[in-house]
Image: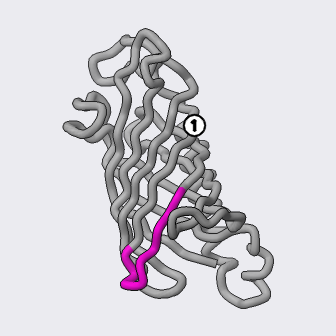
Amino acid sequence: MHTQIIRVLVFSLACIVSSAGSAEEQKTFAWLHEVKFGILHHDTGGLWSGFNRESGVDFNLEAIFSPHIKFLGGSIRPAFGGSANTAGDTSKLYTDIRWQYEHTSGVFFGIGIGGAVHNGKLHFEQHDRKALGSRVLFHIPIEIGYRLSARTSLSVYFDHVSNAFLADENEGMDTLGGRFGLRF
């Protein structure tokens, strides 16, 4: 499944970037607000989950969709994404409702809540793998960044997945890294 997730992420990114040129092509993607690509440290210790067991780097791809609701000076939008781990550890697909506030200076902040599915371990079997307890987990992303232009941005991205103690085992997992955004 790891190789398939990586292939899907790379293919999707290539298709989106190659078609983001002309105004005609951009109209085709009117339902798509922004695409973000990131490189994340997998299972970062010392954050929300408290410790790490797994290793590697995650490639992250996320689509943020155009339909939105204005709320508290920002916008709430649906998002769908995935992170593929390069070391063969846990990879995930997720969907969120994301609120993002953008300041006129170009600085932005986003936070969300959603769900994720993963291919990791459910129960403790190995010392180098997290016991996540459930195949479906809560997904909480937080992002802060800077808009380089009307269409591009750089950001620091954090996300946490866990089952919120709805299962016996709940080691949780955090990722942290950087992302590049491309708006349509």
Q: Residue furthest bottom?
A: 23
* Residue marked by disc 1: 115
Please say whether residue 159 is one of the residues in the magenta stretch.
no
The image position of residue 12, as x and y in percent, is: 64, 61
Left or right, 49 with respect to 117, comes to left
Quadrant including the C terminus: bottom right
Instruction: Decide which of 138, 35 is in the foreground and name it.
Output: 138
The residue shown at (48%, 13%) is: 167
Span shown in magenta: 99-107
Above/below status of 56 relative to 26: above
Colour scheme shown: one colour
Left or right, 50 with respect to 3, comes to left
Left or right, 150 with respect to 27, comes to left
The residue shown at (53%, 32%) is: 118
Name the element at disc 1.
Answer: strand
Residue 54 at least partly seen:
yes
The answer to which image quadrant residue 76 occupies is bottom right
The residue shown at (71%, 90%) is: 22
Please say whether residue 101 is one of the residues in the magenta stretch.
yes
The residue shown at (69%, 67%) is: 66
Quadrant including the N terminus: top right
Q: Name the amino acid, label 1.
A: Gly
The image position of residue 174, as x and y in percent, is: 34, 39
Above/below status of 108 relative to 115: below
